[in-house]
Image (cartoon, rainbow, N blue to C red):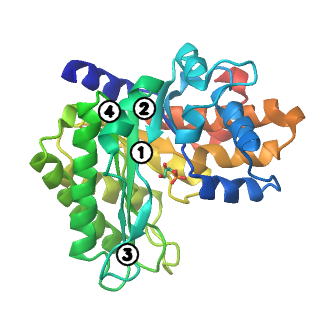
Amino acid sequence: MDPQRLDEVARAMVAPGKGILAADESTGTIQKRLASIGVESTAETRRAWRELLIGAPGLGRHVSGIILYDETLRQSAADGRRFVEVLDRAGVLPGVKVDRGAKPLAGHPGETVTEGLDGLRERLAEYAGLGARFTKWRAVLAIGPGQPSRACVSANAHALARYAALSQEAGLVPIVEPEVLMDGAHDLARCEAVTTAVLAAVFEELRGQAVRLEGLVLKPSMVISGTACPQRAGVADVARATVRCLARTVPAAVPGIAFLSGGQGDVEATAHLAEMNRRGPHPWELAFSYGRALQAPALKAWGGQAERVALAREALLHRARMNGLARAGAWTPESEATPAAAR
Ligand code: 13P
């Protein structure tokens, strides 16, 4: 591992004006996404959808990196070039999800621990050989009565740290993703308390495993009211609570924080990011690593029709541009209507 190289890649992933496109849906999740537009999930339809994203012209303007699923990292564009090569040309860093999913946590019904540490060193070496520059591991924490339990927080934080250390050893920047789910009737204050406790535990474990903070990217959920909360907090409150929570838990040595969207609407996720950046400067870059919030409009526009690829790509690039503006706090609702040529 060359620490300087690691730090450089981490900084590039959260470079000003840019963020990460999460396109690492596992086979089960992508099947649901494709089913929503009436497309059957096969190796070829998954490849075609991912090629639409990867080959979008000018993707690198606002997208620094893309998180791929194992299958996609090994696939090629229709013209025979490997996706990794297409991304290199476009100036977009290829990354890969390396966890093996959230599995039931023993003795704690309804809670999960993310698995995948066994054999991870060998898999990371293979991913590095395939051209990946960074990796991702997602831990999932639900808010409910008595949840998340201490067992759930500590098991997931420990696994995240073990993963991050192995990833850095392999020369791959780890995206450390502790996701506190939005599901539930909890309010903003409860989400802030839980997220603060989770992030504190994660950084304690990262320190314990001697993970290099300069060479990682944190991918947290925003502090936000539960989807079933009777009085959901507005944009300003979400931004204030999220920034306060991060300031209390994330060391300034971390170069950047790239939020997940977690089921927020695409414009909602952009508005929150813009408001947080307007409240800067912060010790870290505040970027995005959205999956659904970047892909949803494009997926709908595509509908599995080859003749609508260009339209779908424009929808993707529009969201990337909007989030690029949000990175500088320059996005306003009016930006959404600005024609591409004027941007
Ligand atoms: P969402 O932005 O759709 O939550 O996806 C991000 C991600 O990578 C979840 O693991």
Task: Work out whether mark 2 precedes mark 4 in sequence or the reverse, and give the earlier one.
Answer: 2
What's the residue type where badge 1 is placed?
Val
Above or below, 221 relative to 96: below
Name the secondary structure under disc 4.
strand
Name the secondary structure under disc 1.
loop
Task: Work out whether mark 3 precedes mark 1 in sequence or the reverse, and give the earlier one.
Answer: 1
Label 2 or label 4, whichever lies nearer to me, is 2
> Could you tell me how far apart the alpha carbons at marks 2 and 3 are, in whole angstroms?
29 Å
| Residue at image coords 76%, 43% | 45
What's the residue type where badge 3 is placed?
Glu
Which disc, if any, is residue 318?
Answer: none
Residue ID for mark 3: 111
> Could you tell me how far apart the alpha carbons at marks 3 and 4 are, in whole angstroms?
28 Å
Above or below, 104 relative to 162: below
Label 3 or label 1, whichever lies nearer to me, is 1
The image position of residue 226, as x and y in percent, is 46, 72
Task: Work out whether mark 2 precedes mark 3 in sequence or the reverse, and give the earlier one.
Answer: 3
Task: Work out whether mark 3 precedes mark 4 in sequence or the reverse, and give the earlier one.
Answer: 3
Query: Which quadrant does the N terminus fall into?
Result: top left
Task: Work out whether mark 1 precedes mark 4 in sequence or the reverse, and give the earlier one.
Answer: 1
Label 3–label 4 contact, CB within 8 A: no
Which disc, if any, is residue 127?
Answer: 2
Label 1 or label 4, whichever lies nearer to me, is 1
Label 2–label 4 contact, CB within 8 A: no
